Image: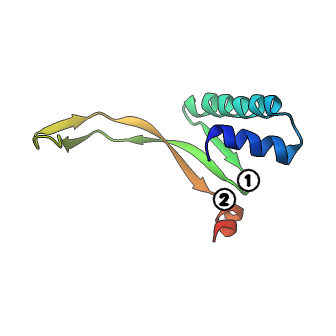
Amino acid sequence: MNKAELIDKIATNAGLSKADAKRALDAFISASTEELKKEDGRVALVGFGSFTVAKRAARTGRNPKNGDPINIPSKNVVRFKTGNELADAIN
């Protein structure tokens, strides 16, 4: 499902216009991004799951073209852990 399809589903399920559903989704994405940028940012949706930020350590990798070692710098990554209700629904 892409963003446009998600907007259609939100609009249908919530009885909103597509424009209102798009604004709501954009507001959720914006608020979540702002929160995850914080040092201890976390977005938890009970029953669905939670988004957290983790630091991936620097490491040495290999260039796939010639096998030479390359340094991959550390960076922050977003992690998602499913909630119990979502996990139960898909199993």
Q: Residues within 10 Å of mark 1 (few under 14, many from 20)?
A: few
Local SS, label 1: loop
Q: Evaluate if marks 2 and 1 touch, with contact meaning CB atoms under 8 Å apart.
A: yes
| First in sequence: mark 2 vs mark 1 | 1
Q: Residue at x 59, y 45 (%)?
A: 51
Residue 79 - label: none
Local SS, label 2: loop
48 vs 11: above or below: below
Q: Nearer the viewer, residue 4 or 26?
A: 4
Q: Residue at x 63, y 49 (%)?
A: 50
Across and down, in percent, residue 44 comes to 68, 46
Give amino acid for label 2.
Gly
Q: Is residue 60 left or right of residue 67?
A: right
Q: Residues within 10 Å of mark 2 (few under 14, many from 20)?
A: some
Q: Which residue is mark 1?
A: 46
Across and down, in percent, residue 78 comes to 51, 41
Residue 83 - label: 2
Choose top left, top right, bottom left or bottom right for residue 5. Answer: top right
Across and down, in percent, residue 39 comes to 54, 32
Q: CA distance from mark 2 to mark 1?
A: 7 Å
Q: Nearer the viewer, residue 55 or 9?
A: 9
Give amino acid for label 1.
Val
Choose top left, top right, bottom left or bottom right for residue 31. Answer: top right
Q: Residue at x 29, y 38 (%)?
A: 58
